[in-house]
């Protein structure tokens, strides 16, 4: 078998690579090799199971036609210099395929922690449909300890609470999603978890030892993920490129898709220079935690700012808005429970939005959405830190 353009993986980056190749005039139809076609979006499936969103509303692939031929299989070996891939198809037969150019978009694998030998419980991740099904089958009263304060940890916590488990949440910091949420927003979501019976253990240095000391029946491992690619599939300029999560680790599906498109165009145009890096510019982030909707636009990690400034506005203890700035320019907006026009916000952030103008307009959005008037007292609570 011989293919001009081969893609390993079937996530957003793979889809983007196929689009990019075709849009740049790639002569042949891309070929995709991936297991369990089509691959579901696990976080999206969680929201469906919990009843937060309808099935099609959680699937980034909904109503999309894949511009590629599809092979079911998992790459067993890759010979980059020989331009050859071997995989096993759905019938257990080995397929040998030679290629001219290839994109590796095989995502990530979960990171692990060294656990004390005394631990005899079950370790669950949140990385595949099988993982999600295991969380959905938990029995009421099961003692569950989740390690990790990021998005995946929050997903695990909510799944365990939905099954009426005894849930403990262990994290190294005093706040959740520290690279995504402001301190006030993080505190609000931690309160949501505690109101649902979750026992939060923060600022724990030895998270593995502490978690095992709680004697869990199930240990949820949410300590991040790392890039994954088949053995031998190292990048070679003009021949093999890595896209999406396989490039350097977890990224949002929209960022991964955009990176895949850029890689596909780059290879179709036979450029000899290095392939493009992923860019998160102008990408919104959306999540849901105990039905509290969270949205982020632009840069949301204050640690990346040269001169970080933060303005937080709580409204009625249920709605929340945080505006982030670098010096005198607004660079990001994070909201909870507030429906704001993402396209308009992203345009303003890209064009350079003066802080004072952003503060005034964001405040108007908060008022218009919640149908209340911000009082002088509430205005005083909204301050720069």
Image: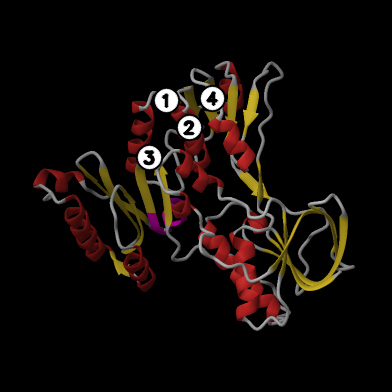
> Closer to the camera, 258 or 9?
9
Tag on residue 186? 3
Image quarter hosting the N terminus: bottom right
Secondary element at tag 1: loop
Give the number of the disc on residue 96. none
The residue labelled by disc 2 is 157
Vertical position of residue 85 compared to residue 27: above or below: above
Q: Where is residue 251 in the image (x, y as percent from the top left)?
A: 55, 55
Write the start and end of the magenta stretch as one range. 296-305
Decide: few, some or many residues near mark 3? Use Cα within 10 Å; few <14, some 14-19, many ≥20: some
Counting residues from the start of the chain, the first of labels 3 and 2 encountered is 2
- How far apart, in angstroms, are the residues tagged by discs 1 and 2? 8 Å
Placement of 269 over or under 135, stated as above or below: below
- Name which of mark 1 and mark 3 comes first in the sequence: 3
Task: State yes or no: discs 3 and 2 in contact (Cβ < 8 Å).
Answer: no
For label 3, the SS is: helix
Residue 149 visible in the current orientation: no
Image marks 4 and 1: residues in contact by CB distance under 8 Å: no
**Distance of label 3 from label 2 (alpha carbons):** 15 Å
Specify whether residue 167 is painted magenta. Answer: no
Please report the residue visible at 45 percent of the width from the left and 62 percent of the height from the top: 283
Residue depth check, mark 3 versus mark 4: number of the one nearer the observer: 4
Label 3 or label 4, whichever comes before in sequence order: 4
Outermost residue to the front: 91
Q: Which quadrant of the view contains residue 71? A: bottom right
Task: Give the numbered dot on residue 198.
Answer: 1
- Tag 3 and tag 4, C-beta contact below 8 Å: no
The percent coordinates of residue 334 (x first, y second) are: 35, 52
State the mark number for residue 145: 4
Q: Is residue 86 left or right of residue 15?
A: right
Q: Which of marks 3 and 2 is in front?
A: 2
């Amino acid at each position: 078998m011989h293919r001009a353009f081969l893609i390993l993986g079937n996530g957003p980056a793979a889809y983007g690579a196929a689009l990019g190749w075709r849009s740049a005039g790639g002569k042949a139809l891309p070929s995709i090799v991936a297991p369990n076609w089509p691959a579901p979006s696990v976080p999206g499936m969680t929201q469906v199971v919990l009843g937060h969103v309808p099935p099609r509303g959680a699937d980034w692939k909904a109503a999309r036609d894949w511009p590629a031929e599809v092979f079911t299989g998992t790459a067993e070996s890759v010979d980059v210099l020989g331009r050859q891939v071997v995989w096993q198809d759905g019938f257990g037969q080995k397929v040998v395929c030679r290629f001219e150019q290839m994109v590796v978009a095989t995502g990530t694998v979960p990171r692990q922690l060294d656990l004390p030998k005394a631990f005899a419980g079950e370790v669950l991740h949140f990385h595949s449909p099988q993982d999600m099904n295991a969380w959905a089958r938990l029995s009421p009263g099961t003692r569950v300890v989740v390690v990790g304060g990021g998005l995946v940890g929050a997903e695990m916590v909510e799944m365990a609470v939905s099954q009426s488990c005894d849930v403990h949440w262990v994290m190294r910091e005093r706040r959740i999603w520290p690279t995504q949420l402001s301190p006030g927003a993080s505190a609000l979501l931690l309160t949501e978890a505690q109101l649902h019976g979750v026992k939060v253990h923060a600022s724990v240095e030895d998270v593995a030892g502490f978690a095992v000391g709680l004697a869990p029946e199930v240990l949820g491992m949410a300590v991040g993920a790392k890039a994954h690619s088949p053995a031998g599939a190292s990048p070679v300029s003009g021949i093999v490129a890595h896209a999406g999560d396989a490039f350097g680790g977890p990224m949002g599906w929209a960022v991964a898709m955009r990176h895949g498109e850029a890689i596909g165009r780059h290879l179709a145009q036979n450029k000899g220079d290095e392939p493009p890096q992923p860019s998160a510019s102008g990408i919104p982030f959306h999540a849901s935690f105990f039905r509290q909707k969270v949205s982020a636009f632009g840069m949301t990690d204050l640690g990346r700012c040269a001169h970080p400034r933060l303005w937080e506005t709580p409204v009625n203890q249920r709605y929340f808005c945080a505006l982030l700035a670098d010096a005198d320019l607004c660079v990001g907006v994070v909201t909870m429970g507030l429906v704001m026009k993402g396209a308009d916000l992203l345009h303003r952030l890209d064009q350079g939005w003066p802080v004072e103008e952003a503060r005034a307009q964001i405040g108007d959005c908060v008022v218009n959405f919640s149908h209340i008037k911000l009082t002088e007292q509430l205005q005083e609570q909204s301050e720069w830190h």
